[in-house]
């Protein structure tokens, strides 16, 4: 199995996701965590696997110097267009993460790695590279697809045969990630490289709501409640994604 990069069709699907409540909740939680953790000064930011540039654009609008790296040309072009339409500047590099240590000379104050690990053939191999790219007094914003939430959702749907076969990964051409992450395994792999300072769940209840309830809910209410419960000791671990703010060891 190889790392998954996104073609034009997948790019359109990703754009749709950010057009609805799921994407709005994801951005709201990530932005709230970053605002809470980062200092109030301009930072050199590296977004690894930046996709369509939603998070990078927000960081640029906060006054940070942002470099976006993305292996898929359709995704990177979408990010360029988004920056241009917003009148913001950024540095755009089309490259897989494996090439970054040789193409980037100085470490960054903040490294963003959102929804990347679950698309890699060997997810943990990127962790030392992320450490190399981060300044000793910097931050890593790590968001990943939560295997626990995927298990729970399949249990709620009664997909017991699927559970017994342990076939939770997405199909090759689907937008279900191919390598959902076990948080305990990831935490073990971070040891010696990173110290996790804060942990939040992204969409801790929205995705479990019946469809008719989702349709009736106001977006403002969804955002308020997701933000309020993103670190609840019983609910945070059910987030469809988990967001960890990390400092180098």
Image (cartoon, helix red, strand yellow):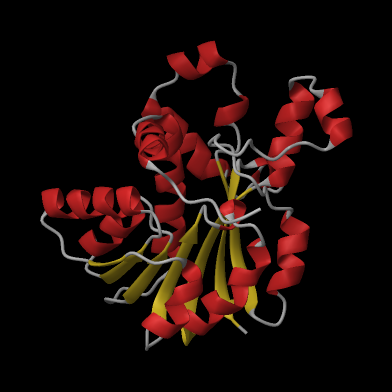
Horizontal arrangement in the rendering, residue 238 relative to residue 102 (left or right): right
The image shows residue 87, relative to residue 63, as above or below, that is above
The image shows residue 19, relative to residue 192, as above or below, that is above
Image quadrant in which you'd find residue 67: bottom left
Residue 196 position within the rendered picture, expressed as x and y whole percent measured from the top left: 63, 70
Of 230 and 88, which appears nearest the observer? 88
Horizontal arrangement in the rendering, residue 98 relative to residue 8 (left or right): right
Residue 234 shows in the view: no
- Outermost residue, front side: 1
Name the residue: 60% across, 57% down: 120
Q: Dividing the image into 4 quarters, which one contains the C terminus?
A: bottom right
Name the residue: 40% across, 33% down: 13
Residue 98 position within the rendered picture, expressed as x and y whole percent measured from the top left: 51, 72
Image quadrant in which you'd find residue 239: top right
The image shows residue 244, relative to residue 247, as above or below, that is above
Of 143 and 232, which appears nearest the observer? 143
Residue 30 position within the rendered picture, expressed as x and y whole percent measured from the top left: 45, 53
Residue 223 position within the rendered picture, expressed as x and y whole percent measured from the top left: 43, 36
Horizontal arrangement in the rendering, residue 207 relative to residue 81 (left or right): right
Name the residue: 63% across, 26% down: 208
Residue 165 shows in the view: yes
Horizontal arrangement in the rendering, residue 245 relative to residue 178 (left or right): left
Of 231 and 45, which appears nearest the observer? 45
Name the residue: 35% across, 54% down: 55
- Outermost residue, top side: 212
* Total tally of numbered discs in the picture: 0
Of 12 and 247, which appears nearest the observer? 12
């Amino acid at each position: 199995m190889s790392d998954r990069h996104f073609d034009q069709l997948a790019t359109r699907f990703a754009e749709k996701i950010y057009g609805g409540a799921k994407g709005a909740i994801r951005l709201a939680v990530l932005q709230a965590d970053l605002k809470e953790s980062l200092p109030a000064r301009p930072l050199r930011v590296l977004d690894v696997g930046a996709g369509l540039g939603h998070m990078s654009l927000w960081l640029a609008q906060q006054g940070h110097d942002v470099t976006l790296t993305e292996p898929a040309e359709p995704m990177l072009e979408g990010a360029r267009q988004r920056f241009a339409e917003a009148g913001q500047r950024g540095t755009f590099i089309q490259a897989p993460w494996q090439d970054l240590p040789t193409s980037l000379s100085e470490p960054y104050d903040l490294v963003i790695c959102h929804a990347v690990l679950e698309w890699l053939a060997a997810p943990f191999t990127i962790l030392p590279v992320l450490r190399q790219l981060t300044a000793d007094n910097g931050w890593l914003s790590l968001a990943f697809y939560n295997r626990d939430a995927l298990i729970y959702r399949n249990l709620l749907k009664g997909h017991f045969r699927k559970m017994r076969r342990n076939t939770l990964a997405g199909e090759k051409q689907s937008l279900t990630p191919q390598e959902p992450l076990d948080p305990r395994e990831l935490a073990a792999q971070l040891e010696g490289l990173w110290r996790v300072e804060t942990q939040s769940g992204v969409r801790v209840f929205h995705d479990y709501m019946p469809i008719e309830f989702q349709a009736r809910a106001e977006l403002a209410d969804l955002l308020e409640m997701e933000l309020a419960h993103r670190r609840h000791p019983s609910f945070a671990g059910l987030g469809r994604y988990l967001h960890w703010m990390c400092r180098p060891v």
